[in-house]
Amino acid sequence: MIADKKKTGYIIAVCSILLNLILFGIKYYAGKKSGSIAVIADAWHSLSDTLTSIIVILGLWIASRPPDQEHPYGHGRAESIASIIVATLLGMVGFEFIFESISRIADGVKVEYDSTVLIALIISVVSKEIIAQVSIRYGKRMKSESLVADGWHHRTDSISSGLIIIGVIFNYFWWFDSVMGIGVALMILWATYNIMKGSISTLLGEKPNPETINKVESIIRDVDSRISDIHNFKMHSYGTRKEMSLDFRLPASMSVDQAHDIATDVGIAVLEKTGIRTTIHTEPEHEKENSDEMTDPVEKE
């Protein structure tokens, strides 16, 4: 599974690198020829996609490494780190072209487009949307954050090229090209925000979604009818490896051995049916009246 994920990710990322290098050359030439800051910005956006695809390859390689003594949960979070690096590069590109576009408005720079620009942008829109579809689809299927992030990076490039095409067609005002440059930059920054938000949330740890909680609760109750008050769910993601901690109550008269056996059976059942590894804290039922005060031991201090 991990080997197939890495191989597929490598193939997509390498194809992306080659495509973006070609698009950079085409759009940079067209932008320089016409003097369009929007087209030049779009060309550098494509080149930044090349850098992010290289980062994706590195992230997939590190994430595929098995757990070791220093990293008992594996290296899956390398993909989240790679996604944050991708987003940081995107943000830098976005701010740079906002400043450049504002400067050109202040200087009153006018752009005259030609057919080269239009052809270059049409090629960019079609090809980048294709690679975006492939990256996002396979990224979601393999649960690869960095591949999905790279796909959205491609999609912003496709959309920004589409916006510039509109600018080429409706280029009635001298400042229109610079305004389109700002529009492209804002789209880049919006993609940056969304990638950062998801990756940082994964690194910080999240509460499982209601669907996952309901499914796990159902599995647990099927293991032993004496289990009650399942609560305190927490989830940590390490790439494809999911770690969940939770608490539940058992009759106070139950022996430690019995409680341990039930917790073990619950862990096995949840892993087999969801792929999630669990850490379980069992509590005696007579503590139920204090349920509102139950928190992690660290939090209670």
Image: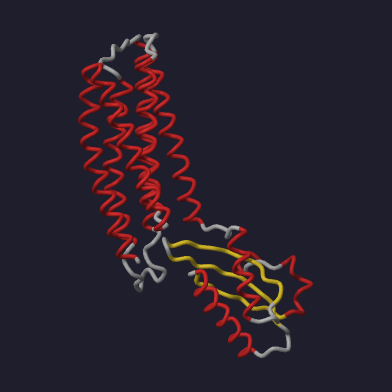
> Residue at point 50% right, 72% down?
277
The spot of residue 83 in percent (x, y) is: 38, 49
Q: How is the image coloured?
A: secondary structure
154 vs 216, left or right, is left
> Residue at point 33% right, 22% down?
38
How many numbered circles does the render carry? 0
The image shows residue 165, relative to residue 253, as above or below, that is: above
234 vs 192, left or right, is right
Q: Quadrant of residue 97?
A: top left
138 vs 116, left or right, is right
Residue 129 or 156: which is nearer the viewer? 129
The image shows residue 124, relative to residue 101, as above or below, that is: below
Q: Quadrant of the C terminus?
A: bottom right
Residue 97 or 31: which is nearer the viewer? 31
Q: Quadrant of the N terminus?
A: bottom left
> Residue at point 39% right, 14% down?
170
The spot of residue 284 in percent (x, y) is: 71, 81
> Residue at point 75% right, 76% down?
287
Residue 117 or 249: which is nearer the viewer? 117
The spot of residue 252 in percent (x, y) is: 73, 85
The image shows residue 201, relative to residue 265, as above or below, that is: above
The image shows residue 174, relative to residue 232, as above or below, that is: above
Q: Quadrant of residue 261?
A: bottom right
